[in-house]
Amino acid sequence: STQAQRTPVQDAYPSRLADIPEKTWLPRQEAVVKGRQLSGPLSQAQLDEFERKGYLFIPNLIEGAELDQLRQEMKALLNNDEYLDKDFSVTEPDSQEIRSLFAVHFLSERLGQLASDERVAGAARQIIGDEPYVHQSRINYKPGFAGKGFNWHSDFETWHAEDGMPEMHAVSASLILTDNHEFNGPLMLIPGSHKKFVPCLGETPEDNHKRSLKAQEVGVPSPEALEELVTEHGIEAPKGKAGGLLLFDCNTLHASNANLSPDPRSNVFFVFNRPDNRCQAPYAAGKPRPDFLAHRPDQQAASYR
Ligand code: 6CS
Ligand code: FE
């Protein structure tokens, strides 16, 4: 119900505003790296880089037969016709091609294992400072010549406004399953933007996710705000062979272009959240989104299989 909405006064991260925001950005409240003392695969230097830039790319994390298996698994999932009419399978705005398939750590045992693999979940633990749970998982797929892009956004902005994620204690881990090069629409990030929350203009429409997952128009910073941030911080696009892992903070601004090359671009990604930061009531939307977009720590796979 709309009673779940909070007033902006109580909220450190107000967004979906009716009027043009007073300030371009508000300072981040939470630390970026919170588990330096915990065990895990990342070095202190890697944690420093993540802290500074809001992302870290680890080339060739997975190789050889293990990578081949994961690519096979992705193909099998994308070709599974049973998923075609499910709400967790999202197609492109103008065609029936799959753009994103959600809840993949529940749909696939192999990907479920990957989500709890120490190389991935251990890195998340070191960043967020506690044993992570999967808040969201998905495969993003951009076929050659046909895959569309994603507008600039902060994931946290959506998760806070629409899913009720209280604070910035989540990290995304994106394993690239195809080579990422400058022509197939690799992820672009604004390094350092994770320390600034950009309030966005425009109230959340009902069932916004049905459109936003195809093309996000609400919860995106204004061109003026983006220009200011890019002027200060620049844009980076880590590229590399399949099997590289990109870790990025929940509030790092990112986007990607359409794929105008013949080569598909795909990745599987897991968003890890801290159990004490589980989602509550939305901060700026009428009702919470379906759970394939925002899992709860105790949720079972049974609801998808
Ligand atoms: O809706 C989500 O949870 C994710 N998808 C999009 C297109 N934007 C926000 C967030 O990354
Ligand atoms: Fe995103």
Image (cartoon, grey):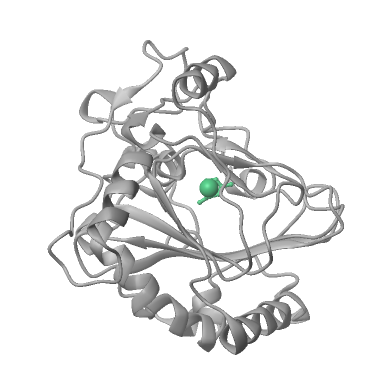
Q: Position of residue 3 (x, y in %)?
A: 33, 38
> Which residue corresponds to the image point at 47% horizontal and 12% vertical from the top-left?
20
> Which residue corresponds to the image point at 37% horizontal and 10% vertical from the top-left?
22
Q: Is residue 8 above or below residue 275?
A: above
Q: Quadrant of residue 113?
A: bottom left
> Which residue corresponds to the image point at 53% horizontal and 22% vertical from the top-left?
226
Comparing 279 with 108, the one in front is: 108
Q: Position of residue 231 (x, y in %)?
A: 50, 18
Q: Residue furthest front?
A: 45
Comparing 77 with 242, the one in front is: 242
> Which residue corresponds to the image point at 12% horizontal and 63% vertical from the top-left?
37
In-image side of 142 versus 191 (left or right): right
Q: Position of residue 91 (x, y in %)?
A: 75, 58
Q: Is residue 291 above or below residue 33?
A: below
Q: Residue furthest left?
A: 37
Dividing the image into 4 quarters, which one contains the N terminus? Answer: top left
In-image side of 256 versus 45 (left or right): right
In-image side of 232 versus 52 (left or right): right
Q: Is residue 84 above or below residue 76?
A: above
Would residue 165 be visible to someone looking at this image? no
Q: Position of residue 160 (x, y in %)?
A: 37, 43
Comparing 98 with 204, the one in front is: 98
